[in-house]
Amino acid sequence: MAQGRERDEGPHSAGGASLSVRWVQGFPKQNVHFVNDNTICYPCGNYVIFINIETKKKTVLQCSNGIVGVMATNIPCEVVAFSDRKLKPLIYVYSFPGLTRRTKLKGNILLDYTLLSFSYCGTYLASYSSLPEFELALWNWESSIILCKKSQPGMDVNQMSFNPMNWRQLCLSSPSTVSVWTIERSNQEHCFRARSVKLPLEDGSFFNETDVVFPQSLPKDLIYGPVLPLSAIAGLVGKEAETFRPKDDLYPLLHPTMHCWTPTSDLYIGCEEGHLLMINGDTLQVTVLNKIEEESPLEDRRNFISPVTLVYQKEGVLASGIDGFVYSFIIKDRSYMIEDFLEIERPVEHMTFSPNYTVLLIQTDKTLTYSGEICVWWLEDCACVSKIYLNTLATVLACCPSSLSAAVGTEDGSVYFISVYDKESPQVVHKAFLSESSVQHVVYDQQGIFLLVGTAEGKVFIINANSSSSFQIIGFTEVAKDILQISTVSLLETDIVEVMVLSSLPEAGRSRLEMFTLPTLLPQVSTTFADERGRLKDEIIHKYLYELEHALSSAVLGFQSNQIYGFCSQVPYICSYLLPEEEHTGIYILKPYKKVQSRQYGPGLLYLSSHGLWLITIAKCGILCIRDVYTLETFAWCRSHSHQGHGIQSMRISMDGQNILVNGRDDGTLVYLKWKRFGGHLASEILDYYQKLLISLSSAMDKENHYLSTTPKVSVDLGSDSEHTVIRRIRSRDIAQEAKAEVQVAMMEVEESCAKERSGGFQKQKASTDLSQDELVLTDVKKEIPWIQQKSQEAIKKEVNLFSKKRKEIKQGIKSLSKTILNMMEENDKLENIAKLDQQEFGLDLEELERLHDESQEEVAKMIKDVEMHNLAKSYLAELIKEECWNSMAVKGRALKCFHIPCVVENFPMKARTVEELKELERVLQQKKIEAECLKLRKEIVEAQSGVKLIKQRHEEDDEEEEEEDKTVKYSNLPNYLLGSLSTDFGVDTSLLSSQLELHSREEKINQIILLKDIIYKVKTVFNNEFDAAYKQKEFEIARVKERNVRIREIILDLELEEAVWQPEFEDCEKPERTLVVQDEEITAHKHIKPWHKAKELIVNHEKEHWLLIQDASTRLRALMDMMGGVLEVKKEDILRMVIPQPAFMAKPDAVWTEEERKQFKDYEKKVKELNEERDKYRKSLEAELKKLQNSIQESTQAFDEHLKRLFERRVKAEMVTNQEELKISNLAFSLLLDEELSSREKFLNNYLTRKQHEKSQTSEAVRKSREDLDVCKEHYDNLLAEDKVMDRSFKKEFSEIPGHQVDILYKLFKRRPRISKQKTHSETTSVVPFGELPGSGKLNKDAFAQLMKAMDELDNISNMPEGLDPLVWNHFCMTRRAKVENEQKVKQKAADLLEMATFLQKRVEEEEKVQQEIERVFHELILLQEEKVRFQLNLTIQILLKQGQVELENFQLVLEYSDAILINKNIIEDLNSVIRTQGQKKVASMMESKDVHKRILQIEWEHKKMEMEREDLNQKAWDIQMLFFSRDRQKYLNEPNYEALISIQIGIMEQTIAVLDKMHKKNVENCKKLLKKLGKFSNQKDIANYALSCNLREELVAVSERKDICNAMGSKLTCEKIVKERYENMMQQQKLTNISKQQAEQISILQTEVERLRMKTFPALVQM
């Protein structure tokens, strides 16, 4: 669509003026090619550039459909082919030097061609395309047809070349593969045959690849079944199985980079790993050449890593790497030696020799933009006059209108002023370092007064353009950062320069225009216009801001009427805007005044001519349009570039409008456009203005040019010349000449594309002052400071001098304040930690404190967010684990521990069975029940036939008992050792399981696995039930122990014992759900309590304290607590704590006691004695109760431990059963897997066989077609040869009228043939050119034939006529001889074609035989696979239970004396056991083989019996054949020698008879049709007659009724008898007619039957004999 738009929607010129391409200069982005010995060419943008390396003459060929794609040259024919880059590209073939198009090749490629290559002889062109076709095509470029093509999906090729010695070989290489394609031809048919090269490994070694389809080295396994290929194990059945390799079997191979052919049709391959390979062109055998290390190895910096390009020379190759050196590889046998050949400054991208091998072209990747090369060119012949290097990255360039100087902007923010007064020696006269931001725009005004420099940071510097003022920097103004364009208007009639700056506002989708005015006298009064820092004052320069509602990519300021022209970036329109006449403040929104469709797509740029009447537009489409500034209509246009190269980047037009230079954006081309038919008012207007401008600037130009001629050169570090493409002419290894193919930046203000890419630049650095110091810190004097920083520093110095006193006062105040703060900090350090302040609190910078606080808050928020996300991730992971390992479990996993012994029993964690599993189990159970019922019915039928009914009657009672037992539990009839497990010990029903000896089919194995899984589930369920019962028992025991421990604690408390009470508890493994709940005591971190929680706790504590105060206030309760311990009744348990209080008199001495007191003392002693006795009794009873409770706890827990030990044994047995069943499942699953592998292998072989059979049909068809073509060609050859012999024999007959001696002379002349002189090659060329005389490179067959005919013209000359011969006879002789020569040439050509077709047929026959061998091999593999499959299905793996731990001894004699024993190492016994085990395995294998042999013997015996029975059958059939009835037809078949001919004769006679009968039948049909037609006509007549009769009948009825009345009146009796008689006669006649019709119907049916029989008799009887 883009191409269509370029062609159809391009603007049309309104007048006679037009533009044409004068010359093109560009960089070669692709490889450079030779067209002949002296001319090179390369594509550049829309053009192909041809350069004569001797005369430096340049020729340009333009592609009509945009940018040039890939290119190739044919040196013998001197033609060049290239493709375009449009959708569905074309290939163009042009001849050189005429540059006329020979042909245009159109294929089916959708996107692009990637490679083109000509054959060295013939008219063949190979093309290759990548995505999406990946198609290789062979063209006959003369006839513009595709001879053959082939697609290789996914194969990306980076190099393609024909074999110079054999056009039938084509090499394609990529970074991973190398393939050699052979072109086979049979007459006019061509086809490709591809062969891939097996590359070595990265270390140069070779890997022995095994056959993936039919592996031969697979091990044999007699126990676990057949061993199959990896593709069958992977389940692959398609084409991918043929190349499948596991990841571990894939080894990195060498990576080819370049290849080149040799005269012996071999290939040299360079690899990334540094290896050099040699490949035989016929056998494709790869040889890794060995490198011979020299005594003095190369330096490290010149270490050869990998060849980037290769080119063949005699005795080796020339190679180049990425180090910028060219090496010579001297190759001998299988080794090579490296020598230095040439040193290049840059890495070499491409090398090639000229056809005569006298010139070596070396192409580097040098980029001139980074070297800052500035060149001066002649516009007429595109000759480089001189150049200069800045050694820095140049971004923009502009030429001064008022002097012979130019300004160059650089990336580092400098502007270099270059004097071109001496064109052959340009020099830098001044350098202005404006800022550290890159320079993006350099613009002179129309009169060359000011130079405007725009930087990336949004500053526009105004510089005096006159060299006499030393390019004074006047000042700068600030604009928006993203500057798109700077436009100026400087008219001769005014004394001001208007400047407009366009910048973009991407956030708002708008554009901004900033306009200001510069008076021409500004350089003289610049100090008043700028401030101390160099910034121009906005109010003085009248700066105004404008904005547009839409985005512009370019805008220019018109010369008249204050008008602006803009190019819209989003829509293809060019708009004009009128500026307001009144002054305004702020931003003014401009509205479009006029809008015209540009018919150019993509963002564009606008330029004005020197006289302001031409508006020049360029855009991404690559079209340059020149428009009238008033109407905006196009009057001239030219497509110099293409949208594939992103169009035009910049344009410059000379002041007289005669010369236009256009620079491409990405294609690297500079195009010089010249006017054609340029005249009239267009030329007069601009020439007049140009003359006025020259007159106005003449004095200034003379002055400035004189100053430039006397200005000394500025010392700038300039580099030396370097070249992008170097061409070396080699004679005896001497470098004779250098030629250049490079493009530099011209002096016509062509900006480089890198300026747009590096718009970021460096940021502005500001000079800072430290107020805490006494002096200003200045930058280093040695470092160059930008002008803007210098001005800033000067302003700062003035400010410092102006406010020095105030500055000192501020410094003193700051010092005193700092001392105060230091004292406060010292006091703060002496305080406690809780009272200390942070160091940040002493900061006086409130903004800094706020910033630090904000940063800390951000850090805290970030940490909180990170912790929350981390916790969320952990919570999600915990939830997943909980869901998988806990919630999804129907039976939770838990353990159970004993009370006293270290024994732990775990249950079986189980998930609930899914609905699908239950349905599948139900289906299998139902199927097994049906099978059991069927088997039972069959047994009953058999028993009924054998009379077992009596036994059933006798044992009816026993059967009823057995049925009752069957209802409870059903067990399998098989014993445990054959069942393979102990699942019956858990009461599981195994009756539905199939015997292990009967599992042959896949469905039976799957059903068995389902039943085994059900058994495992039931076993686990049984054990889990027992485990749950034990768990409940432990809960009961723990509860009972707790209950008893309550009493034990009371007794211990009463007895005041220090014993610890044993209290059993459940551990975490017994109650795992406790691990899912986090307790408060598990958290070590301080708990965060929310404020409302704290308030609630305070309220609760206050209420509690209030309640205690109320309780203290109760005196009654306090008295009860003090006197009786808070109880009103003394219990029995309180006896041990009971104390009898002593009487008060016991504090007195005994002597002062009274009698009453003594009685009281005796009573006291008695009570104390009784209390002590009660205490002893009660203590003993408590001790007995304590011991009893402890014993009961011990007994119950020990009983539980014994029960748990038995449960542990049950757990071990259950796990054993589970493992046994899982082992059976594993064996069955392995057998199923092996069965799938066998099926996959069988499917693959069948698919492979189908593909081979299809390939066989194709090859058979190709062989048949080739044979037919060969027979036709041979017949033509025989005819031509016969014609040649006839012409030879009939020669004397044609000249029989002349004398015999003249006939003999003419016959000798008739046999004479001219000698064609071969061009002798020079000895020097033969010694230099390694390929010698290329086959067919001199003249093709047509040229050779034309040369022969030219030589025949010399023989036909009248001077060679014998004497006395008639000229008419001589003319006839010459015509006859010429016809004979032409016929001989045809015979030779046909013989060559015949030989080629015979070779083609032989190759097709070999391919057919090879495919047939593959098919036979597949059949053989299928037979072996089927045998293996049958053997695998019959050889079952069964599981048998064996008793373990029992060893049988022949002589049971215990050896108790070991005096004669020796101590040996255990390893010896283990080695012996391993040997015995190995021999045992061999024995088992031999036994299995003998078993197979025995099976085979039984099979052979069975086959023998089968053959004997077949023999009897055959004898019986022979007897039946002898007794068979032998008819005459069969005898005739056996006796007649040519029975088929007789049958064919009879068939022919029958066919003739059938034809006659068919003819007669058609004739009868025609007669019947005629008869039917007549009968139809007769029927119509009868209908008419019947209608007339019906009318008459009505009248007759009336008459009859009248007659009837008369008859009745006359005599009724006579009339009735007459009527009766008439009716009787009519009835008899009707009956007779009925009988006759029946007889005729029978006769007709008999005749129809006879006719059918006769008709069937005429057909042949196709009855099988």
Image (cartoon, helix red, strand yellow):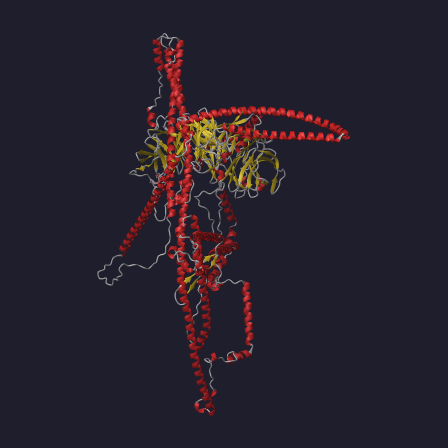
Image quarter of the C terminus: top left
The quadrant where residue 1255 appears? top left
Q: Is residue 1083 left or right of residue 169?
A: right
Image location of residue 1264, percent across then percent down: 41, 29
Instruction: Choose between 954 and 596: the one closer to the eye.
Output: 954
Image location of residue 1633, percent across then percent down: 63, 29
Q: As drawn, which residue projects farthest toward the left?
A: 1460
Q: Is residue 1104 above or below residue 178?
A: below
Instruction: Choose between 1604 and 977: the one closer to the eye.
Output: 1604
The quadrant where residue 991 appears? bottom left
The quadrant where residue 1513 appears? top left
Q: Is residue 36 visible?
A: no
Instruction: Choose between 1545 and 1655: the one closer to the eye.
Output: 1655
Q: Is residue 234 above or below residue 1355?
A: below
Q: As drawn, which residue projects farthest toward the bottom?
A: 1155
Image location of residue 1416, percent across then percent down: 37, 37
Q: Is residue 1444 visible?
A: yes
Tell me the residue at 53%/24% (across/down): 1559
